[in-house]
Amino acid sequence: MHPTQTTHLSSIIALQLVNCYYCSSLFGSVCSSTLIPKCFTTMTMEANIDPENQLMIGENYPETVQIDPRRARFPRCIVWTPLPIISWFVPFIGHIGIGREDGVILDFAGPNFVFVDNFAFGAVTRYIQIDKDKECCTFPHPSAFKGEDQYEQDEPGHDTFTWDAALRKSTQEFQHRSYNLLTCNCHSFVANNLNRLGFHSGGWNVVNLAALIFLKGHWVSTASMVRSFLPFVLAFLLGLAFGGLTFLTYLAFFNFVLVGWFLLGTYCFKDLIHL
């Protein structure tokens, strides 16, 4: 036998004798060859137990909050409702907000103030629920940060955001902003939140956000659909009956100016509309 193999075998025999001694002390008898692996296995399993996993055993996590329109609970949702007068003539423009993990809605509807659980302009009529695990990135989009919160893509160790933490950060920021329907509105607030969350890799603004909720939003109910479009249909029919071509001309001009403003302010003059 090779000297190296002899030395290795001697080490194994010595280790077995030591373990037999401990086994005999523990079990009151000489340890058999079948007991040695059990001792090794037991000690190895005990050494590999993660203390954090031990703490998780027996924990009861709350069930996922479900959408409940009656209680105005829309967890991880973008929510929408029509605006008085404006939505009567431009039905794809409305008021928008975002739901926390517990379903409470946050919306920016006044200067230096974010409403909590008090959705302005009525009940939610359309919503889009977001799967945060599949549709949100780990790191927020750079466009969500300004000034002291400027995010550098290559900066190591930058903090990630949970859903509610991102909403809290945006809320704190918009509590120091003046509200303006044309430059800093509810869409700016929700777009800021989505960019922090990295929703679909970020890059959200007032235009693509409005298009998203209008094209892919789910109706809460048939009544909510009627509530959203009935004023527009009535205003259109009455205007057509009494104004005819003149009404259509003014309506088209109003839509052109309003949509053109947001398109120019978003894609041409990027500092005009705040996010």
Image (cartoon, grey):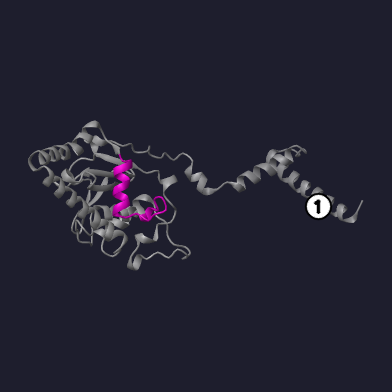
Counting from the top left corner in percent of width and height, residue 41 is at 67, 42
Q: What residue is pinned by disc 1?
A: 11
The residue at 21%/52% (across/down) is 256
Counting from the top left corner in percent of width and height, residue 198 is at 40, 53
Q: Look at label 1 and name its amino acid.
A: Ser
Side of 257 relative to 38 (left or right): left
Counting from the top left corner in percent of width and height, residue 128 is at 33, 42
Q: Which of 224/268 is in front?
A: 268
Can residue 137 be found in the magenta stretch? no
Task: Characterize the magenta stretch by its predominant secondary structure.
Answer: helix
Looking at the image, can residue 216 be seen?
yes
The residue at 30%/62% (across/down) is 268
Q: Which residues are magenta?
A: 195-217
Residue 220 in which image quadrant: top left
Q: Residues within 10 Å of mark 1 (few under 14, many from 20)?
A: few
Side of 223 relative to 170 (left or right): left
Can residue 212 be found in the magenta stretch? yes
The residue at 43%/65% (across/down) is 152
